[in-house]
Image (cartoon, coloured by chain):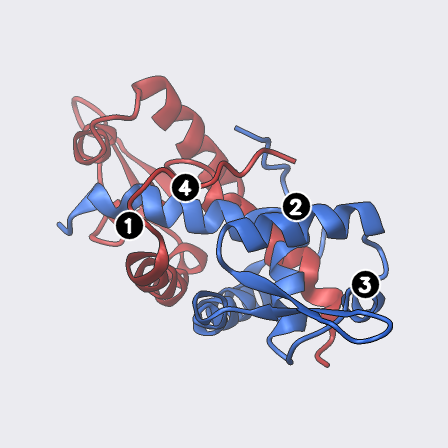
Chain colours: A blue, B red
Amino acid sequence: MEDLTMCPKFETAFQLLGKRWNGLIIRVLLHGPSRFRDISSHIPNMSDKMLVDRLKQLEINGIIERKVYPETPVRIEYQLTSKGRALEPALDEIQSWAENWVENETPEPVENQ
Amino acid sequence: MEDLTMCPKFETAFQLLGKRWNGLIIRVLLHGPSRFRDISSHIPNMSDKMLVDRLKQLEINGIIERKVYPETPVRIEYQLTSKGRALEPALDEIQSWAENWVENETPEPVENQ
């Protein structure tokens, strides 16, 4: 049986990615650096307040970085870090599993811990 | 840009797997059908009450099934369904990402939604 002590890291990863919108934001940024408005336009059901919150959390966790270009007007872009880009294969596998196996009906609710 | 309407399934998957202990329970069951005590012994920090709860949730979500063998005494085993076994590549990718990129220090808390 493998060493199960890796579990806290593993669960940290899933908790971060399982939080609503985070997976989608990362998928948008896999296409390249984007401004706030661009990300927002790809995820129409998410409020701006929520996007601000999620971008901050992803930045704190080292998944994305915020680049400020001192132009007039100032340009701000969000982009994945190496850590964030490294998520692509995992996101692809989960996406593929979900497409094959998760039903279209309303899923069983997974309550918060 | 890909179709982002798949997101609810994707997030359902991550929420289920991000819930504490679920990933570990699935990893234990990837080694084969197990009795309650066997699963419990591999995850010493998890209470029996918690394991009962998680097994029920994973069963409702079609990830595992509970087999009752009418022996004396009755034998009950838990095993992954096809849907559950199909998670292995995704779990491996996340595990590998987490080992490479998640710090050992206490991570930034990811509050519940």
Q: Chain of mark 1?
A: B
Whole-percent x and y of residue A56?
64, 49
Q: In the image, residue A113 lies at what x, y percent?
A: 52, 28
Q: Chain of mark 3?
A: A
Q: Residue at x 51, y 45 (%)?
A: B16
Please name the residue shown 85% across and 61% down the image: A44
Residue designated by label 3: A40
Residue position for label 4? B107
Q: Are marks 3 and 1 on the same chain?
A: no
Does residue B92 appear left or right of residue B31 in this picture? Answer: right
Residue with the mark numbered 2: A107
Task: From the image, tell me which residue sits under label 1.
Answer: B27
Q: Residue at x 36, y 49 (%)?
A: A10
Q: From the viewer's perspective, is residue B69 above or below residue A45?
A: above
Distance between the alpha carbons at the discs numbered 3 and 1 = 36 Å
**In front of the other: A62 or A100:** A62
